[in-house]
Amino acid sequence: MTSPASRRPPSSGSERRVADALERGELVSLRRPVAEDRDEWVALRESCLEHLLPWEPHQKVKSERERWNSFFSTANTEDRQRFLICENVSGETVGYVGLNDIRRGVMQSCNAGYWIAERFTRNGYMTEGLRLAVRHAFRTLALHRVEAGIQPHNTASIGVVKKLGFRYEGTALRLLEINGKWSDHERWAITAEEWHEAKAPRTIKPQPPASTRTPRPRR
């Protein structure tokens, strides 16, 4: 895994990306995708499809470029708000988080969807990215409830929502088609009353690879 400290320094382009952020944390920021992001987004997806596809709903797309077209055209609508997760140091895109199926009226709720590229896992990026998205949902969009549907064996994703205070509300049987199979999904949710930004866990800065750490003296 490449440590954040070893990546390229920020360029003027990456500084602009962070400046365009709608939400910013200690490690990552959220911003809307623009047309110029297509090649980077496609390359990122293609670099880790084996990591991503086992968790994603079945979509009839022929390529990641076609998936981008669908993603980009629905990134800022009344019922969807989708963001790129960008590392603050380099401005590099590391993943995605979206507030989907936004329902107004008496519900004021949405479903959160998210993914992170395999090489960026275990850095705290996904936890902070989702935390920023939930904050955006409650503070900016004035929603009341954020839900997340997660396959029971996706322990990493369940760990993320637990850190942010989501509650388990039951399991929906055969909810979504994943890889040609109807899969159960656990339902996790949090409401505005339960969300306390000051109490939301702060992400921990990633540790350098073991090979670069200074060994502790033996006693």
Image: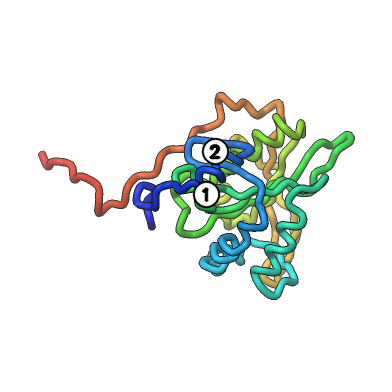
x and y percentages locating residue 209 in the rendered image: 31, 52
Count of numbered tags: 2
In terms of secondary structure, where does tag 1 sit? Answer: helix
Q: Looking at the picture, tell me which residue is in the foreground, 128 or 151.
A: 128
Quadrant position of the N terminus in the picture: bottom left
The 10 Å Cα crowd at callout 1, few under 14, some 14 to 19, many 20 or more, is few
x and y percentages locating residue 57 in the rendered image: 70, 63
Q: Which mark is residue 217?
A: none
Quadrant position of the C terminus in the picture: top left
Indicate whether 67 appears above or below 95. Answer: below
Name the image quarter holding residue 140: top right
Please give the residue where the numbered disc 2 appears in the rendered image: 163
Please give the residue where the numbered disc 1 appears in the rendered image: 13
Type of amino acid at the residue the image marks with label 1: Gly
x and y percentages locating residue 185 in the rendered image: 69, 55
The residue located at (80%, 48%) in the rendering is 77
Indicate whether 81 appears above or below 190. Answer: below
The residue located at (75%, 71%) in the rendering is 60
Indicate whether 204 appears above or below 121. Answer: above
In terms of secondary structure, where does tag 2 sit? Answer: helix
The residue located at (13%, 41%) in the rendering is 217
Q: CA distance from mark 1 to mark 2?
A: 33 Å
The 10 Å Cα crowd at callout 2, few under 14, some 14 to 19, many 20 or more, is some
Task: Between label 1 and label 2, give the one nearer the viewer.
Answer: 1
